[in-house]
Image (cartoon, grey):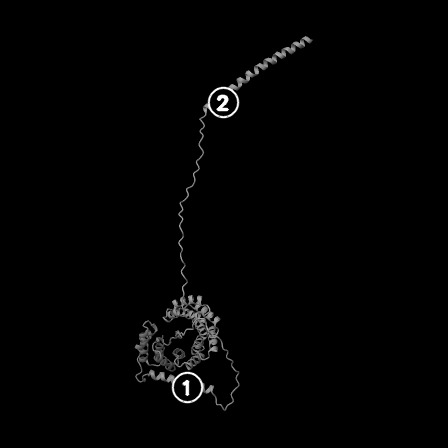
Amino acid sequence: MNGLKNRSEVVWSVAALALLFLLPLFGVACGGDEERQEAERTAQLPPKIELPPPAVVEPEKPEVEEVEPAFVEPEPPREVTYSEAEAVFLDRRYDEAAEMFVIYTERKAENPWGFYMLGLSAWKSDQHGLAEDAVQRALELDPYHVKSWINLGRVLLDQERSEEALEMINEALALEPESSVGFRCQGRAFHQMDMLDDAVDSYRQAILIDNEDVWSMNNMGLILIEQERFDEALAPLARAVEIDPQIPIFHNNLGVALERTGHFRAAEDAFRAVLALDESYLKAEISRARVEGLVEDPNMLPVDLAELAQSFVDEVEGWSEAVAYREWPDFEEELPEVEAIVVSIIDTTVVDTIPVTPEPEDTTKAEGGGGE
């Protein structure tokens, strides 16, 4: 048994040695085949081309020239003096005057006269909103400025805000009871409100204060025409034309009154006088053409306009006597007690010089009716 065992071990030992000898050969054979297959496979592929990395291109920088910026000196603000702006106003260039007074008031905001003239210029150029604001500013600076109260009333009258206008005008009359312009504007307010008798009374009071207030005479004559009191309208209109014959509207209203009283030839002359002053006055041209064809009563006495004007002067003197009689009663009568009136002295000095500006003409566009 031991021998068999030994022999068996020998056999296994020989087999193991043989296997150890064959394994390296097998490994060599297998390795060669893989390398050969890999070489054959690689030979069939196209050669690998390696591209160079993309070049980095720096963006071109624009060439910058260092230029020193040009210095533009700002224009100095325009300055306007009161005299310059007033001269433009008196030349009737009202739009331009308003622009100049705007500049003036920006620099002289403490002067109520500047705002007053701005309001007057704006009113004359139909800029009612600007006019109202400017005059109100003048009154804020000087609430005792009578002309500003009156012209604020005029601005409101042009917008047919007659009740508001009357309040402003009454403020002016409270400060200056002897203002003929104030009563004239009061009459215009009453006229707009269709309070014709009150309007005539206001115009009468204006004429009592200033017996050459031609606009109050004209406006009174217009109301008398509207009331068909044509004979009564002749005297104040004749007096207005006599004092200032350069106002076309005075001749036109006189012509209407003359026509309605049957003085056709005198009416024709009045309408011709209108057209000589203003050839574009269409109403006068229509009226002239109409009266040319009218036959005047041969028994009618010719009208004497100078005599009519003098009759109005005499009438105004009569008013004055009546007022004097009422205000100065007989000293033997006991006078009623009246409350003392305290007059306060206020400082009306302004920073700039107070100009002497002539009162502008009233622009009441009153026109006669009758047959138009």
Question: Dot 1 corresponds to which residue?
Answer: 318
Task: Tell me which amino acid carries mark 1.
Answer: Gly
Quadrant that contains the N terminus:
top right
Q: Label 1 to label 2, Cα distance in Å?
A: 146 Å
Which SS class for mark 2? helix
In this view, the residue in front, 39 or 223, is 39
Which of the 4 quarters of the picture holds residue 18? top right
In this view, the residue in front, 202 or 46, is 46
Which of the 4 quarters of the picture holds residue 180? bottom left
Which SS class for mark 1? helix
- Is tag 1's residue or tag 2's residue first in the polypeptide sequence? 2
In this view, the residue in front, 274 or 227, is 274
Give the class, few, some or many, for how many residues have Cα within 10 Å of label 2's Cα (few <14, many ≥20).
few
Residue 4: which disc? none
Give the x, y percent position of residue 230.
Answer: 38, 81
Task: Tell me which amino acid carries mark 2.
Answer: Glu
Q: Is residue 14 above or below residue 248?
A: above
Give the class, few, some or many, for how many residues have Cα within 10 Å of label 1's Cα (few <14, many ≥20).
few
Residue 38: which disc? 2
Quadrant that contains the C terminus:
bottom left
Q: Which residue is situated farthest in the right direction here?
A: 1
Q: Which-is-in-front pick, marks 1 and 2?
A: 2
Give the x, y percent position of residue 321.
Answer: 43, 86
Give the x, y percent position of residue 125.
Answer: 40, 68
Q: Is 336 on the left or on the right of 93, as rendered?
A: right
Q: Is 270 on the left or on the right of 355, as rendered?
A: left
Q: Are marks 1 and 2 in contact (CB under 8 Å)?
A: no
Residue sitting at 45 percent across and 86 percent down? Answer: 324
Which of the 4 quarters of the picture holds residue 117? bottom left
Give the x, y percent position of residue 225.
Answer: 39, 79
Q: Is residue 336 above or below residue 144?
A: below
